[in-house]
Image: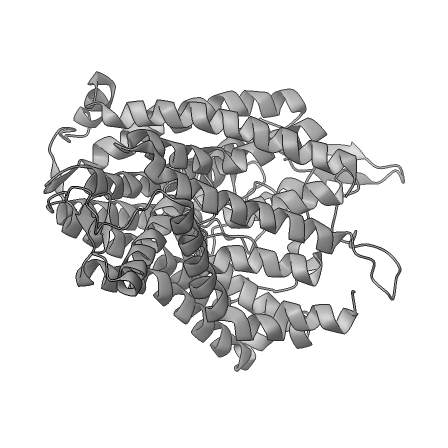
Amino acid sequence: MKIDVIILWVVYFLILSVAGIMLGKIMAHIFKEKGVALEEKILKLIGIDAFTAMNWKEYLLAVIVFNFVGLILLQLILMTQHWHPFNPEARNGLSFWMAFNIATSFVTNTNWQNYGGESTLSYFSQMLGLTVQNFLSASTGMAVLLVFIRSLVKKEITFMGNFWSDLTRFTVRILLPLSFVFALFLISQGVPQTLNGSVSVKTLEGKELKVPVGPVASQIAIKMNGSNGGGFFNANAAHPFENPTPVSNFFQLITILLLPVSCVFMLIFMLPRKQEGYPVLGVMTVLLLLGVVLSYWAQVQTIPITHMSFREGVDSRFSLSECSLWSVATTAVSNGSVNCMHSSLSPLAQLVALFNMMTGEVIFGGVGAGLYGMLLYVLMTVFLAGLMVGRTPEYLGKKIESKEVIWASFALLAPGLFNLLFSAWALNFQLGLASLSHSGSHGLSEVLYAFSSTFGNNGSAFAGLNANTTFYNITTGFAMLFGRFAVIVPVLIIAGSLGPKKKSPIGPGTLKTDTLLFGVLLFSVILILGALTFFPVLVLGPVAEHLILNIF
């Protein structure tokens, strides 16, 4: 491995760790204190009492209603964008199912894009539609995480907080300041921020060319900070207007993981015994590092036919190490942005990206969503370990009983099951097969990747699949909704069950959850549930393609 690659990774993870600790401590302080006048005044304007405590059912209802209303409003904006201002290129309104797919994508924090933003959407749709949902979908994930943490940390609580207060507090105090500063940084690097129409230029051949611009920096800032990933341009972060310099590339890489890492440190600072959070942090870190090393190793291997490494789909501005690091980070987190084309990754690098999404994106994962997904794995590990050694299944002093295990099992297994069912459906009907650009193992991977991405709320894609069809607009749209709420609903039900329980004192029969052994058990459960569920189809897809290419 080259020394410059090692230096890049060391500097990257060092900066990320320091920034994550600092921001995690700030977030823990913000969410430990009671609401202040700022949130109260904002919510008072729309007639909401920021201090009215909600039980889990009221909280869940607020989450569902808020997201449903957001989906309807965004779909209406997209379908009627030809009536709105800030449309210098005169973009037409979108069809019902395309608008549904895009609206579902951004409301669920997936940001799956089967369209070119610069050629399809008006500035109004990008700013008032997509960018607003980038903030709100990330804040929704954080709000759900806060309920889960409170149910574990606090004693005998029935009321879990106020959804509107949690949502507003995270948006106003964390996302807006971070995104404002990062947008200014991106502008300094050359990312456009304008409401003017396309710029006409003359090419070297003397032809007239329209270069699309727009309010790019403001959207990219929250796209990265909120684990959203949906780009202003079709090429996403591989486009020079979204990611113009090595410096912008490095710091966008930082922001992919910044808030997810900060969420883990926030949990550690909010726990009565900080060491209880170390196994969670350790397992996430090990899985991430293993993915980065394997992906890079796979990318630099020589293809026997061409005697070259996997440079196709990688912009000449970026190295293979930057491409590998981004592809692993963006799929470990529910970000989904790309600085190289994932369909052109080596088969084993594709395998890493698929595995990251198939585990439920719990390797730090999305803002809020990744950590509450990992905590579901923790509950399953505690239960299974308790069964094996005959000890009472407890986590943080709360007894883990059948209700919690049933709902945790549903949240962890249901998205994967439906992912396989939808993939099989698409591969057995002409409507699904018609969109494939490749046959064989790579064609299988194209479909599997699409549904892994949408059920996992990631949003990245293999460009070889033409997903802008009625079939894929409908199936991936409902996949994104199911992938989001099939986890959120069980998490809040579990929180409602754990919250009122008494905390048991640590005794000789208590399974220790702050040890290296527990970390190994947690790691094993993730591999068993994540890898073995999808092992057969992964063998038919990226593993088979790797063997066909004879890369050894």
Give the mark count. 0
If the image is split into quadrants, where does the C terminus sit?
Answer: bottom right
If the image is split into quadrants, where does the N terminus sit?
Answer: top right
Farthest residue in the front direction? 508
In the rendered view, would you say 139 is above or below 92?
above
The residue drawn where x is 35% and y is 27% is 27
The answer to whether residue 436 is visible is no
Q: Nearer the viewer, residue 191 or 265?
A: 265
The residue drawn where x is 14% and y is 42% is 503
Query: Residue 449 location, x and y as percent?
Result: 55, 63
On screen, residue 397 versus residue 388, left or right, reads left
Residue 161 lies in what quarter of the image? top left
Q: Nearer the viewer, residue 390 or 393?
A: 390
Query: Residue 218 location, x and y as percent?
Result: 51, 29
Which colouring convention does the figure follow? one colour
The answer to whether residue 439 is visible is yes
Query: Residue 117 location, x and y as percent?
Result: 57, 45
The residue drawn where x is 60% and y is 29% is 251
Query: Residue 330 location, x and y as percent?
Result: 55, 46
In the rendered view, would you say 222 is above or below 523?
above
Farthest residue in the top direction? 37
On screen, residue 149 versus residue 249, left or right, reads left
